[in-house]
Image (tube, rainbow, N blue to C red):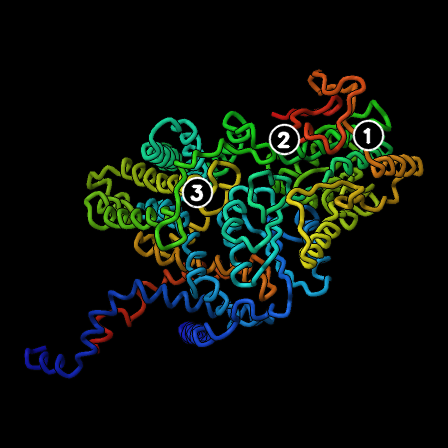
């Protein structure tokens, strides 16, 4: 009968806890009481885990920088789906914690979720990552994004010097304009080193699907790709698999040096710390934040990981030279004469698309030299 | 026992007589509640091991899920898809089938509704909405009905089949949303064309939760009537208890299985319709939000009783509503609520073994025999 005795004891404990809970309910934790001293409460919402070595970690690093600022309370919530859940999370941060500035960081949070809540909460500022805000949207909402294609172009230069097989690989989530721009930039960077280099791309179809990412990386290694990069939410699996297969890695989203070690060449990273501290400082000072903000390497929106030990001096020199050119402005990765991988002309001789060109926002092609298909 | 003794006994211990009548009926309520309490206690120990306060945890669950108008709004807004998704588990379960792929019916129901929505734009809004809901239900019904048919016609295990078909459904959603049904304007987040404003479903009066909540309540009541008060439901329960006996009696087991699975799938498809029409405004990958899997948990906690699904869904909705506050205030990971739900789930399943084994639920115990 020890079993039933145990059961009773546990049931008692449960009841006791519930009773205690009931007793404390209502009395504790008045909304906003804890934040009375802080002039600004800032909420960050992530679609995945904030230590994913990728997209979400890049934003969490930005949040950490804001946390270090004077007079700011930072709230964070991870793994929030792009459903009713994110509306509830935003409302919870507003109602329970008195958040005045929100950074819902996933692309799918904007429409319909931010568009739904922003008009009902005119005192709260909604800053969304992704460049979706357009004229006519609520004025207390805004978009910010970075031109990270240039980072992939620089990745390509490092890859172009490191590859021996002249084949590099790209693990991609979905064939959408942003991802295609990264793939094309990566190959064009490598071709700036050696025009015979080709890039094999494999789409996994999902932003986060570890098994397929590992399969894709292995398939790339099997085909002889000896430098691999990616555009998925968390590059952890791609990095570790590539290194296990003896391939060099170019990072994406965040710094993956801890994962890839000596096999890490460099990486295209978001620099949200600079963007977020700037926006929070402006909000505290009462200055307006423009509704549509975009920037590249020169504006501190993106940055490159430190070059790894496998990067040769020749690679370093070209990398730094091109980086300086990009920082100076007006640099174009997509420039004529250029064809896509089906033979259609993308850019005629003398035509160039700089990173800010809106034509790049609807990119639907893979350039010549990329092996793969968008559909 | 002679009549004089009988009167004597009944006069002396009237409360015992009431209890002897009441306790057997309350077994189905008291055992789950007891199991819930045990689950709370075990989770409290888990928190204590982590050095966190269980009192704070439960206070936060209360605060975020149930303490104020906003909390209720937060909780109820999660309830609609959960209730409808759990019917997709509960209905087949009454026939002894464990269907866990409701997620597939939700995403396909949502896709069918969204595509219908783009086609019915010229029609009056009411007709358009009815067609959208009908197509959503049809898609879900066909999908899960096929699971039932595979079971009956080919002997394919329905649990595995429904789970695998959920993956196929998700792949189909992605294929169509990124292919022929893609709105060319949806550049970086492939979606179907946005619904016309007249086809959107709004909030109910007085509560900030959409009409899907009411649809879920009505669906639960209908299912309860179907199962408990019709010959069809009676036949289904017999088939669920003993399929051989049902077949020997000449009950149409095959049609019952296909019908109940299809009906469950139709409700999941309806959940997809409401996600599209009330929340997202178009079909895209955001439909894959895991409601189908939480529905499994709710159906099992409710022991597949459609009326019990409602309070359980509200309870789970409240738990999930508190996840954010627990992350923020207690510095616990978001998986905390999942661990909590998992512990409660396992203990509720273990408590199944207690039915019919505890003497306090027998009249004999209270009558002193």
Residue at position x 54%, y 62% in the image: B325
- Tell me, yes or no, whether dots 1 and 3 are on the same chain: no
Q: Which mark is residue B275?
A: 3
Callout 1: SS: helix
Bin the neighbour count of mark 1 within 10 Å (Cα to Cα): few under 14, some 14-19, many 20 and up: many
Q: Nearer the viewer, residue B218 or A87?
A: A87
Q: Evaluate whether residue A2 shows in this view.
A: no
Cα–Cα span, label 1 and label 3 = 44 Å
Q: Nearer the viewer, residue B123 or B324?
A: B123
Side (left or right) of B242 relative to A203: left
Q: Measured from the top left, where is residue B344 in percent x and y?
A: 45, 62
Callout 2: SS: loop
**Quarter of the image that includes the N terminus of chain B:** bottom left
Side (left or right) of B68 relative to A41: left
Q: Measured from the top left, where is residue B221 in percent x and y?
A: 27, 50
Using the image, determine if residue A270 lies above or below residue A333.
below
Residue highlighted by disc 1: A190
Chain assignment, label 1: A
Chain assignment, label 2: A
Residue at position x 73%, y 62% in the image: A68
Residue at position x 32%, y 35% in the image: B126
Chain assignment, label 3: B
Q: Measured from the top left, where is residue A348 in percent x and y?
A: 76, 17
Q: Which mark is residue A175?
A: 2
């Amino acid at each position: 009968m020890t079993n039933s005795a145990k059961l009773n004891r546990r049931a008692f404990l449960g009841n006791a806890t519930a009773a205690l809970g009931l007793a404390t309910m209502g009395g504790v934790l008045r909304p906003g009481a804890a934040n009375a001293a802080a002039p600004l409460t800032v909420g960050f919402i992530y679609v995945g885990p904030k230590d994913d070595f990728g997209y979400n970690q890049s934003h969490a690093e930005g949040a950490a920088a804001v946390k270090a600022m004077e007079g700011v309370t930072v709230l964070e919530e991870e793994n929030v789906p792009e459903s009713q859940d994110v509306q509830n999370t935003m409302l919870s941060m507003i109602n329970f914690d008195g958040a005045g500035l929100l950074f819902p960081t996933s692309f799918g949070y904007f429409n319909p979720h931010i568009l739904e809540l922003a008009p009902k909460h005119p005192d709260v500022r909604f800053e969304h990552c992704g460049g979706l805000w357009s004229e006519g949207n609520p004025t207390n909402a805004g978009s910010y994004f970075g031109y990270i294609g240039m980072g992939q172009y620089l990745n390509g230069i490092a890859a172009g010097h490191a590859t021996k097989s002249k084949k590099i690989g790209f693990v991609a989530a979905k064939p959408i304009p942003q991802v295609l721009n990264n793939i094309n930039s990566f190959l064009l960077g490598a071709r700036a080193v050696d025009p015979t280099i080709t890039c094999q791309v494999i789409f996994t179809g999902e932003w986060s699907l570890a098994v397929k990412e590992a399969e894709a990386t292995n398939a790339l290694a099997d085909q002889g790709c000896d430098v691999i990069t990616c555009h998925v939410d968390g590059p952890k699996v791609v990095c570790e698999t590539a290194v296990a297969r003896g391939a060099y890695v170019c990072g994406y989203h965040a710094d993956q040096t801890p994962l890839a070690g000596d096999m890490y060449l460099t990486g295209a990273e978001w620099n949200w710390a600079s963007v977020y501290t700037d926006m929070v400082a402006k909000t505290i000072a009462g200055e307006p934040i423009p509704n549509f903000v975009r920037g590249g390497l020169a504006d501190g929106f993106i940055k490159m990981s430190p070059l790894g030990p496998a990067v040769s001096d020749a690679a370093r020199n070209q990398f730094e030279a091109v980086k300086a050119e990009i920082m100076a402005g007006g640099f174009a990765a997509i420039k004529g004469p250029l064809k896509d991988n089906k033979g259609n002309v993308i850019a005629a001789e003398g035509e160039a698309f700089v990173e800010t060109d809106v034509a790049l926002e609807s990119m639907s092609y893979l350039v010549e030299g990329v092996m793969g298909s968008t559909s | 026992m002679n009549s004089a003794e009988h009167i004597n006994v009944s006069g002396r211990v009237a409360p015992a007589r009431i209890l002897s009548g009441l306790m057997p009926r309350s077994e189905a309520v008291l055992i789950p509640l007891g199991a819930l309490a045990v689950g709370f206690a075990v989770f409290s120990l888990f928190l204590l091991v982590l050095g966190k306060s269980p009192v704070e945890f439960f206070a936060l669950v209360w605060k975020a899920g149930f303490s104020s108008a906003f909390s209720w709004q937060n909780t109820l807004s999660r309830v609609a898809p959960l209730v409808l998704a759990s019917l997709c588990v509960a209905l087949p379960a009454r026939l002894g089938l464990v269907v866990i792929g409701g997620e597939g019916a939700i995403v396909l129901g949502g896709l069918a509704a969204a595509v219908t929505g783009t086609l019915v734009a010229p029609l009056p809004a009411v007709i358009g909405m009815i067609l959208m809901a009908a197509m959503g239900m049809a898609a879900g019904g066909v999908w899960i009905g096929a699971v039932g048919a595979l079971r009956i016609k080919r002997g394919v295990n329905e649990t595995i089949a429904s789970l695998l078909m959920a993956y196929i459904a998700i792949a189909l959603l992605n294929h169509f949303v990124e292919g022929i049904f893609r709105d060319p304007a949806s550049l970086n987040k492939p979606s179907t064309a946005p619904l016309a404003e007249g086809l959107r479903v709004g909030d109910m009066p007085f509560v900030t939760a959409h009409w899907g909540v009411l649809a879920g309540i009505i669906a639960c009541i209908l299912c309860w009537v179907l199962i408990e008060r019709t010959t069809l439901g009676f036949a289904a329960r017999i088939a669920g208890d003993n399929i051989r006996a049902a077949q020997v009696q000449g009950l149409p087991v095959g049609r019952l299985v296909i019908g109940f699975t299809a009906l469950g799938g139709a409700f999941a498809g309806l959940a997809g319709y409401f996600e599209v029409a009330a929340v997202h405004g178009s079909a895209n990958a955001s439909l894959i939000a895991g409601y189908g899997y939480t529905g499994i948990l709710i159906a099992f906690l409710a022991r597949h009783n459609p009326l019990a699904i409602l309070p359980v869904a509200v309870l789970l909705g409240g738990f999930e509503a508190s996840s954010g506050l627990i992350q923020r205030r207690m510095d616990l990971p978001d998986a905390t609520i999942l661990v909590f739900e998992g512990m409660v789930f396992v203990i509720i399943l273990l408590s199944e073994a207690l039915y019919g084994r505890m003497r306090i639920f027998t009249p004999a115990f209270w009558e002193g025999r």
